[in-house]
Amino acid sequence: MRWFEVTVTTSLEMVDWIADVFHANGADGVAIEDSEVMEQTYDSIYGVINGLNPDDYPAEGARIKGYIHDGFDLEDLEQQLVETLARWKQDGTDVGDGSISRREVVETDWATAWQDYYHPVKVSERIGIAPTWEPFEEGTEPEIVIKLDPGMAFGTGTHATTTLCMQLLEQIIHGAEQVADVGTGTAILAISAIKLGAAHVVALDLDPVAIESAERNCAENTVSNQVTIIQNEMGIALETYGAKPDVLVANLLAEIIVALAGDFSAWIKPGGRGIFSGIIENKKAVASEALEQNGWSIVRVIREGDWIAMEAKYM
């Protein structure tokens, strides 16, 4: 079977949107080369990302690579990528270079080669993430270890948008809270909430691949009985799962947070806390304005690189 690597060079803001186009068109794997990776530092006691070559990463923005076999229409895929970039650029989003390239690749072990770059790492005061195939070294384990198998379709849980959420969860969860995780992906935030003491998490995602990943990771971390995973959009979930959470976590994008701000308010308990991430610095104002217009008060903002996460209280 012939395989092709289609590469889109764009901005960090566009990563999720371009990855979605790849997944929707049958990509068997998506790799993200993020310029921020080279800037991240991790405590060497807990684990490091080894073997990274600066030449493999863009100076800014990101390269998203989709791996497609020859049974799919590559021309149609590339046209969809062009249209996606053009649409967001027209809406005022920085799409960076916006170039698209294609090359044929040899079918070898590329499907698992990415695992070489994923090692145990501490991401907050109490929490560490370890791939299922490599534990922390003895004596270096943090208080809470989350075992994660992201598969090829998801990140490793160490991106700033995720770690910022985990840092806020660590400060918000005190025990027995009901939590909602909107856009759960691998369920890493749902698992974190349970490990920190939450009583139960409702985890939502539209993507069936995400649902499979979430179920697998919850089982791996023995929290399946405390996490209800629902494949549905938030509005329908509100109707079918009526319990209101004490804490709502949404690691999405600013545009989606703006669109769902009313639903967040409809679901959360009065006085409840929200954690909103996936927000690039220049979209902070529009995201916070939408939340405040729907009854949220921003408590604090934390940053890593160009990304921010906001803790808010629903009044």
Image: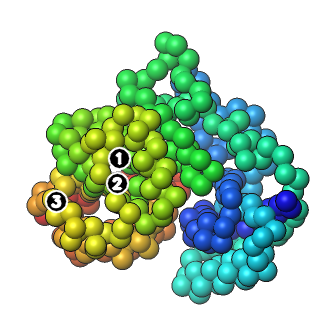
Nearer the observer: mark 2 or 1; the answer is 2
- In the image, residue 267 above or below residue 134: below
Q: Which mark is residue 190?
A: 1
Residue at (56%, 52%) from the top-left corner? 154
Q: Which residue is mark 3?
A: 244
Residue 314 drawn at (x, y percent): 17, 62
- In the image, residue 160 above or below residue 98: above
Q: Quadrant of the N terminus?
A: bottom right
| Residue situated in front as seen by the camera: 11 or 243 | 243
Instruction: Give the mark nearest the N terminus, 2 or 3.
Output: 2
Nearer the observer: mark 2 or 3; the answer is 2
Residue 284 drawn at (x, y percent): 41, 66
Residue 21 drawn at (x, y percent): 62, 72
Instruction: Give the mark nearest the N terminus, 2 or 1.
Output: 1
Residue at (49%, 50%) from the top-left corner? 213
Q: Which mark is residue 229?
A: 2
Task: Tell me the crowding category of disc 1: few under 14, some 14 to 19, or many 20 or more residues within 10 angstroms, Cα based.
Answer: many
Residue at (68%, 64%) from the top-left corner? 27
Look at label 1 and name its amino acid: Ala
Look at label 2 and name its amino acid: Ile
Task: Tell me the crowding category of disc 3: few under 14, some 14 to 19, or many 20 or more residues within 10 angstroms, Cα based.
Answer: some
Instruction: Give the mark nearest the N terminus, 3 or 1.
Output: 1
Farthest residue to the top: give it.
Answer: 139
Q: Are marks 2 and 1 in contact (CB under 8 Å)?
A: yes
Q: Quadrant of residue 197?
A: top left
Q: Are marks 2 and 3 in contact (CB under 8 Å)?
A: no
Relative to residue 305, is residue 219 drawn left or right?
left
